[in-house]
Amino acid sequence: MAAIPLVEEAKKSLQGIQKKDFTTAKSFANPPQGVPEVFAACMYLMAGHWPDIIEVDKNKRPKSVEWKSCIKMMKNPEDFVLRLQDFGKIVDDNQVVAGNVKIIKETYISRPDFIPEIMEQKSGAAKGICSWVLNIVKYFDVI
């Protein structure tokens, strides 16, 4: 199936992120343009699967994707990356909220700066998360 390589590619995109990349990202009082949107898109994918960090509404959408909420999501970088690496199980079990994927496509991926190479100039963490989001969302175009 063509979708499996996309989930594996998503996992690989996390390998280059180092703890210091998250430390840098968390230190942004006013993050570079596009960086908050990358983490917000990630929150939409993770919504409903990380209740102690991402508070959701009745539709399993994040209640807040403000930068402060993104920082909270990154508070423990090792746990954050581990959850992203294990996300393939959530995808395999068809537990990703379809409405959230639609929002990511319409609101975030459609942005001209939602590109890993552009994010790399702004934040190492955002580059990896951007690539991860793109690969996970592409999976839903394949299945």
Image (cartoon, grey):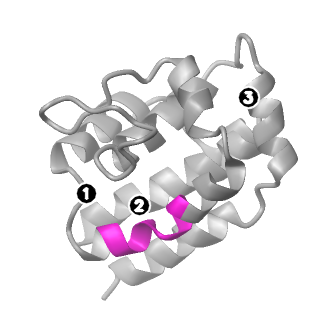
Numbered label attached to residue 96? 1
Residue type (three-letter) at the residue carrying disc 1? Val
Residue type (three-letter) at the residue carrying disc 2? Ile
Mark 3 nearby-residue class (10 Å; few <14, some 14–19, many ≥20): some
Badge 2 vs badge 1, beta-carbon distance below 8 Å: yes
Q: Position of residue 55 (x, y in %)?
A: 34, 32
Q: Which residues are magenta?
A: 83-90
Q: Identify the residue at horizontal 48%, vertical 51% (top origin).
A: 133
Numbered label attached to residue 136? 2
Mark 2 nearby-residue class (10 Å; few <14, some 14–19, many ≥20): many
Q: Is residue 102 visible?
A: yes
Q: Of the two numbered discs 2 and 1 on the same chain, state the one appearing first in sequence.
A: 1
The residue under label 3 is 26
Q: Secondary structure at mark 1?
A: loop
Q: Find the residue positioned furthest to the left.
A: 58
Q: Of the two numbered discs 3 and 2 on the same chain, state the one appearing first in sequence.
A: 3
Query: Along the line of sight, which residue is nearer the eye, 52 or 142?
Result: 52
Q: Position of residue 109 (x, y in %)?
A: 42, 39
Q: Find the residue positioned furthest to the bottom.
A: 1
Q: Identify the residue at horizontal 45%, vertical 73% (top origin).
A: 7
Q: Quadrant of residue 31?
A: top right
Query: Looking at the image, is 68 positioned above or below residue 4?
Result: above
Q: Find the residue positioned furthest to the right.
A: 20
**90 horizontally vs 29: left or right:** left
Query: Along the line of sight, which residue is nearer the eye, 134 or 94?
Result: 94
Q: Identify the residue at horizontal 87%, vertical 44% (top origin).
A: 20
